[in-house]
Amino acid sequence: MPAQAGAPPGGGDQDKLLEEALQVVKSQSFQMKRSLDGSKLMEGLKHASKMLCELRTSVLSPKAYYELYMAISDELRHLELYLVDEFQKGKKVSDLYELVQYAGNIIPRLYLLVTVGTVYIKAKNIPTKDILKDLVEMCRGVQHPLRGLFLRNYLLQSIKRDLPEDTVETKHGSVDDSIDFVLLNFSEMNKLWVRMQHQGHSRNKGQREKERRELRILVGTNLVRLSSLEGVLPDTYAKKILPSILEQIVVCKDSIAQEYLMECIIQVFPDEMHLQTLTPFLDACGQLEASVNVKNIIIALIDRLAAFSLRDGPPAIPDELNLFELFSGQVAQVIKLRSSMPTVDCIALQVSLANLAIKCYGTQMEYVNKVLEDTAEILTSREEAGLGHGNQATRELVKLLKICIDDYDSIATALSLEKFVDMFAFFDFDLRQEMALHALQSVADKGTHLSNVDEVETYLKVIAPAISDQEDQPSEAPDPEDFLEEQSLVGRFVTLLQAETPDMQYQMISLTKKKLSGGGAERLKFTMPALVFKAFRLAQQYAELGDTDPNWEKKMKKIFTFCHQIISGLAKAEFTDLALRLFLQAALTANSVEFEATESIAYEFWTQAITLYEEEVSESVAQIAAITLMVGTLEAMTCFGEDNQSTLATKCAIISSKLVKKSDQSKGVCLCAHLFWSCITLEDKGPKKDGKQVQKCLKKATKVAKSCMEPLSQAAIFVEILNRAILFYEWGAPEVPVESLVDIVGEVREALESLVDEEEADPVRQYFEATLAYIEEKKAAGGEFSYEGASFDA
């Protein structure tokens, strides 16, 4: 196919042209193989030359040309294998090497010359270095960018396994000769690659850039081969290889080539070599074209060396080489020289420096402080305050602060950085909220304890958008699920307040209460209970200290006052059920710590709970639930004297008897019977054992149950009364004789017989039958409460 001028056609024309070329290749390769099989070498070379003429084309796109090149390269492999076989039979390669140089066209001539030259090297009849030098120089004859690139790539691929790698000079050369060969080939290929950008009309510039990027691997292959030479020592790399590569990169003045090749150097050469050549490499970065994205290059090198420093084994980086200071100075210089560098790139460089500082120099906080200071200076000088989601620089700034939070073992370390909190001034509300959630999640995931007031105060500033309304926040309400998750995390944070001393702990929870109190009613129900329970634990800590702290009782009172204020605030915010439960829990906590004011404090909490119940609880379900909770709480308390115990027990019985629904009245009064008979010892007496009050409660419950009009509900209540009566009978209450159990059993049977829907009554009937089975088991076993003389049969 003859060479043609002008831009390559596109679309379907490319497919047609490529198909035509491949048909020629297929035909000529077939003829070549047939000739070679018949030992007709000259005829085979003639067909190979015709096949190679297809590579003279200028009408194919780089992508199509690559496909053609690969097809021809595969066919040339057959020729090479044939020549190797002929050489082994005693044929002279030198004559053939001279002969192929008489081919009529330069493209076929040079491809054949490289193919035969490869065999010539394998024959070892002439120094390898001489052939290498000859081949690489001869390839200068093709100066068309696309054709020249592929020709030199063929050269490199053909002889890459035969390059000398000896560190000492031999008759065939040494690794230095291989280095010279690859460097020269690289230099010429890069020049050809750069020249592609300047061919054709300016309107096709974008297309040419795309095509060049598709071909960049051809140039980079030279650097890969250099890095794989076994004889290349770090000293050789530093003095010979890198300076030559950097010189070529700088002088080409092409941004695409410079950016790719600098990144290629970072990727293909070992870390140990980079450590020895950081200064010249970074100096070269400063000499690159203004349009080169130097940020990506420097970040790639920093990240690679940071990962290298963390490898197992001996220290990878010498102590005398301070990577942070070296990179920090270079980054500052680059930003200074490139005033047009986007803010996002400047911050991205700082992110990489922070990553390096934390991973390699984690104990030297001044390095991360410097990164934050430099970042603040960049943002201030560029007037970036109030950045939002739309600005990419803020995403990098978020990344920087998240690294500080995530990479340290404790968030307390990040909070101790001087400029950490100041950086939040550059965010809008959405980003401050994002950072707040990240900080909350980090503490929750790591289980990090905040141990002093300064840490808590700083942390509360960081999570401010999560604990109170902000002036710049949107007017619309947040998503309910997101809000729930956020406030749950705040509650978890409160549980992680853990100071070394109780006094410091009190200061921490007091500060937290002050900040959380301004969060509004919707936040209080999530955050304040956690704070109350933290205070309960603190009260127990003071109790454990006892007389070792002369003021411990005063501090205990202060803590319970603190809890009282919080719970009262929840009650005012109309979180009735929550406040009621916390008042009762506070009473239990006071009961568990013995000091002078225990009874009075516990009684006060009880008073508040009962008052809250009477004033705010009106729904039947909530009322019976509250009474059940109050009865259970009071039964477990031992700090009350007889008067207070009796007063509270009687009050519970009274409010139970005032419930609207008869079934609830009966359940409530029956529950209250437990307040008058218990094995728990009171403060100034033995166990509560008031059988008369128990009998009174059970009779009242039975009477109310009889007045229920609904048979199923009545039957269920009677079964419950029966089970509680059995308990008191077995506990030895003389006022609850076995005859009373027989009477209740009769009431249950009567209620069950009146039911119409048998299936609906199954749960109650099963409960009743299980109760009777228990009684029969006890009768059979005998003992003090053997139910002898009582018949429970129908």
Image (tube, helix red, strand yellow):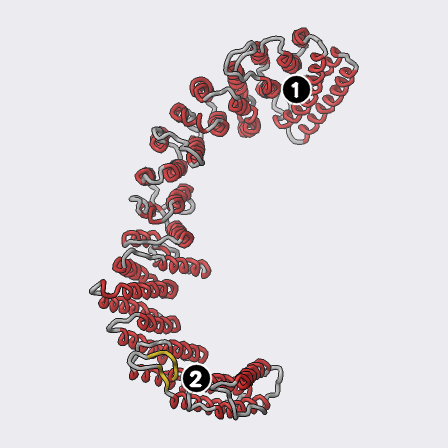
Q: Is residue 199 above or below residue 581?
A: above
Q: Which residue is mark 1?
A: 55
Q: Give the image location of residue 66, x and y in percent.
A: 63, 25
Relative horizontal placement of residue 513, taking residue 238 as reference (left or right): left
| Residue 772 badge | none
Amino acid at dot 2: Trp
* Farthest residue, direction left: 550
Identify the residue shown where x is 34% and y is 46%: 414
- Which quarter of the rendering shows the N terminus? top right
Residue 119: where, in percent of width, then height?
65, 14
Marks 1 and 2: in contact by CB < 8 Å?
A: no
Camera-nearest residue between 542 and 387: 542
Tag 2 residue? 731
Residue 734: percent from the left, percent from the top? 42, 90
Disc 1 crowd, CA 10 A, few/some/many (<14, 14-19, 20+)? many
Depicted 520 relative to depicted 290: above or below: below
* Mark 2 burial class by Cα count in 10 Å: few <14, some 14-19, many 20+: some
Q: Identify which residue is drawn at 60% across, 8% down.
A: 126
Q: Quadrant of residue 580?
A: bottom left
Q: Is residue 125 visible?
A: yes
| Horizontal side, residue 665 vs residue 105: left or right | left
Give me the residue at 44% from left, 91% from top: 699
